[in-house]
Image (spheres, rainbow, N blue to C red):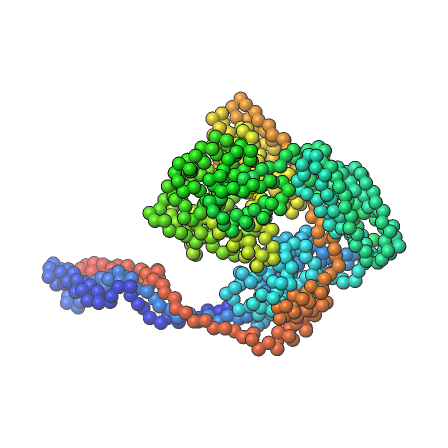
Amino acid sequence: MRDKFFLVEIVFKYSILWLIPAAFISGLLVYFVYFFKKNHDLRARQVWLLSILRFSAFMAIAVFLLSPLIKSKIKEIERPLFVVAVDNSQSMAFGSDSISKISEIKQFLSSLQSELKKDFDVEFYSFGEEVNQDSTLDFNAKTTNLSAPLIRISTVNRHRSIGGLILVSDGIFNRGSSPVWLAQNMPFPIYTFGIGDTVRKRDLIVSRLITNDISFVGDRFPIQVDLKAIKYKNSRLTIQFLYDDKIVETKEVLLTSDYQVINLAFYLKANQSGLHKISIRVLELPNEVNRFNNVATRFVEVIDNRQKILMAYKSPHPDIGAITRVISRSDNYELDQVSLNSISNLQDYNLLILHGLPDRANEVLSLRNQIEQIGIPYILFVQADVNLNLFNSFNTGLQITSKSQNVNQVQPVLNESFSSFQLNAALDELMNSMPPIFSPYGVVSLKNDADVLYYQKIGNVVTDYPLLTVSRNVDKNNVVVLGHGIWKWWLKANQISGTSKPLDELVLSLVRTTSLKVKKERFNINYEKQYFSNDNIRFRAYLYNAAFQLVNQPDVNLRLTNIDTRQEFDYLFSKIDNNYELLLGNLEPGRYTFNSSVKIGNEEFIKNGLFVVQPINAELLNTEANFSLLHQIADNSGGSFYPNLAEENFLNNIASRADLVNTTKTYYKYSDLIDIFWLLFVLAGLFSIEWFLRKYFSA
């Protein structure tokens, strides 16, 4: 991209006619100094020289007071942009020849970029678990999301003239939606380069292990297993089912074809609460190429009872349907629905979800008193036309001040400091594209230490008004959403990526955060029971004094133990605001226990816990390149597919495209004349020269 600037003219914010009285006043001042009082022995020629300098300085000040602007014409020449996106996942370099593969890919990319930069602008991205604008490749990403670079590039460069996207991949993806559908809607062609081997090799694969994340004591929960056996016809396959590392069942299957899919189901009764390990293991057969995919492991948390949720609404609304669908899909919750005027027996529920508030002051007061008396946590969706006086009396920790009952259309903007729970990485990217919802108009202020998840973006202005907050109390958490119309987010999510899973996880995280009452203890630690090896693990700790006020003066220590390796690690929590935070980062797969302690005065508090870090082996489950998918992506977008890194064919293709031409944009730019700092030196110079000459002539 190249810019050319042309000075067009100088314009003034105020009328240039003001220079006439300015000249008159400047002349009077000069006349008074040099002609009216002749208290000097200067010659006429010297007087006139000094007068001109003084008059010029006064007029320069007058010009600056009229706020002069420089009007520049900018001609911007923009070359077409080609974006190179490279799959940086483990499957790209899998095999005994991985070193030569990596070398070949890097040589190809270096040569390709050198050729493209002669005529085009080039941007480089790598992707796997996430998309990075970075040319560093280590082929170590544990997962691949092929849709992510398409969404990112089309969003970030939506104002650029994109000649095409060059996608270098093996076509294997295990996260996100199918990129084939997205490719149809891309405003540029996608040129795909296939890497890897499409020939099937001998392999036994545990492709899926499906079970509940949470079960309940006394329930029988299903475990579904999908296996693949490739090129082992007439062999006998042995499958072991393990519970807490103990073999509880073994099955044998005779393979009758060279590509056989096997579906098995196991059932297990949850007799004991806690975190339990479930594994499926396929015993190795001779000459198997990939042994990493012979085992799959999941963890199930067995708890004593389900959580009961009551949803109360002011009137039927699509938001209610969207939230109900998400919660109803989970076996962990029982959901009842009533209108606001039919609320009763709140003590029977773990969580109250409110969509709107009653219209009468006595009904709001009665509802607030019930909630406070029973101590039930709530999630409140505030309708945009809510009576602000009634809302402010509900003691949510938020206050809205407004002189009118108007409505704002707002979009969510993530608060990077949010800490109540960990967010799905795909959610942040998705929320940037969400349509606006309706929120009450007014100045929003926080009256407590609420944890803000999203702020309000009104038009193009990001405000500090909260949109979604999590309020932490001593024994419960409440959530307030200042708006309605979130049902549109599910439609948009499915339109963008073909799935609404990140939004579903957000709702369930809010429900989990509020439905489980926090024990009224002086020292608490928030953490998840299960993580993956690519998660940035973060703990949050809260310490209360005897009056149950948050404090963070004492140091909080934590000792982490890997049960499998017996390794121990010592940590010290960081003090953030009025609580504590500990970033553990990525941990090796395994089971971990921790012991945390803190002293406040003469009292010592200790907290113990257990969590699991699961390995990410998604890239090693299937290492067979999928060139068919790359073909479809290219065909659906108007691009082409090139196997074996056929650089020359690609360069010949784009050389024949008549649409790849530079574009020119012309616009005007205004800048303040006073910003040109050397003009101030000129002004100071006029006064300085006049003063110096006056002294010199007088001497």
Report x, y in % for residue 529: 64, 38
- Tell which of 108 and 619 is nearer to you: 619
- Tell which of 55 and 512 is nearer to you: 512
Image quadrant assignment for residue 623? bottom right
Report the number of discs. Answer: 0
Question: Is residue 136 among the parts visible in the rendering?
Answer: no
Q: Is residue 207 shown above or below 371? A: below
Question: Is residue 12 among the parts visible in the rendering?
Answer: yes
Q: Is residue 301 shown above or below 4? A: above
Q: Residue furthest top?
A: 602
Report x, y in % for residue 449: 46, 38
Q: Residue furthest front?
A: 342
Report x, y in % for residue 630: 68, 65
Image quadrant assignment for residue 80? bottom right
- Tell which of 372 and 520 is nearer to you: 372
- The residue at the point 15 percent across, 66 percent down is 43
- The residue at the point 64 percent across, 73 percent down is 651
Left or right: 287, with 598 as reference point: right
- The residue at the point 43 percent across, 47 percent down is 465
- Tell which of 89 and 147 is nearer to you: 147
Report x, y in % for residue 285: 85, 50
Quadrant location of the C terminus in the rendered image:
bottom left
Q: Is residue 355 shown above or below 26? A: above
- The residue at the point 65 percent across, 69 percent down is 635
